[in-house]
Amino acid sequence: MPSLVGILRGEGSGPEVIDATCHVMASVASECAVDLRLERFDLADASLESDPNNHLSKKATQFCEEIFARGGAILAGAAGGRFVYDMRRRFQLYYKLNPLRSYSELAGISRLKAIEPIDILVVRENLGGLYQGKSKLVGDEREVWHTFAQSEDQVRAVLNVGAKAARARRNSLVVVGKQSGLPDIYGLWRRCALEIGESMGVKVALADIDYASYQLLQQPDFFDVIVAPNCFGDILSDLGGLFAGSRGLTFGASYAADGSAVYQTNHGAAHDLAGTDRANPVGQIFSMAMMLRETFGLGEEAELVEDAVRAVWAAAWRTADLAGPHCRIVGTQQFAELVAKEIRAAVVRNREACPVAG
């Protein structure tokens, strides 16, 4: 049975990055005999029929509904406005996973001292909190009211995801909030976190967002799994991009209880890079690999993609944001072609190493 992938081509540099990723995905499908069915939707065209208060157009919504109904996943290019927040609310994508990693092939690129290896998972609540609040202009528009809510059901749902992930890793969970600034919300998260940690046998620590941000950069090995409200999780995930060496390498996925999933980069549409063939496609490529592994159960194929990217880096091929001494700088599409070529070469090497008996 084919694995269905709905492609949202994004805005700005999003279409170039998505197209580069689709080229890599086609290589995986061809070389590994995997039946991947891609259906595309252009967000830039659909935005023409959107109104300013509805960033997720009716056509885009219908496209995603059809993909999910047929058991597929969405691979989304970067887009502007409230697109991602509206999509999470519309499809009840209640949590997001953001892996934070370092790569030995990029040692020396980051401004941070290299501490190898870094492998942290941020679990972010998507449906409550600051980003899903409501704003209102007051009087002569010199004042804005913004209200938001956080329910115990939302908190427990995302903490359960985090605790299960922690139990499968190092059994350590850090829950991030702000005790003095948001005492009641902090109290809700604290109570739920300690109860769930005790019931699941997971070690739980609590940290304020400012201290957690400092510790993430100063002592990253303190963290394994982090659970945070949407705004704080967003901040920590972007900070974590420094471990890899570029925000262009950041990626993640949002999930609903029924298994519906949207895979994406963590960076914006970079309109200034649109049409320049300079955007780094790796965050999108890694999100595709995450999709292969998590939604379609194609773990070996996902690892093949990730290893191919790292092999290209090891051969000193880089996009401009990762430039270093003695590197060969290439554009978005050429980097993707190099990754696809490495996938083909790796498959040949594996076949030669393990020939099938006749």
Image (tube, rainbow, N blue to C red):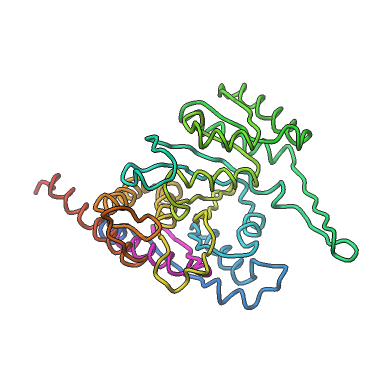
Q: Quadrant of the N terminus?
A: bottom left
Q: Examine the structure image and report whether residue 20 is included in the region drawn in magenta.
A: yes
Q: Examine the structure image and report whether residue 320 is included in the region drawn in magenta.
A: no
Q: Which residues are magenta?
A: 1-27
x%, y% of residue 121?
50, 39
Q: Residue furthest right?
A: 139
Marker count (numbered):
0
Q: Nearer the viewer, residue 311 or 110?
A: 110
Q: Is residue 27 left or right of residue 167?
A: left
The answer to whether 224 is drawn above or below residue 57 in the figure is: above
Residue in the image at 74% along x and 42% along y: 150
The answer to whether 197 is drawn above or below residue 125 in the figure is: above
Identify the image quadrant of residue 145: bottom right
Q: Nearer the viewer, residue 21 or 210?
A: 210
Residue in the image at 71% along x and 52% along y: 132
Q: Residue furthest left?
A: 358
x%, y% of residue 14?
48, 66
Q: Is residue 83 left or right of residue 356?
A: right
The answer to whether 191 is drawn above or below residue 242 in the figure is: above
x%, y% of residue 291?
44, 52
x%, y% of residue 299?
36, 45
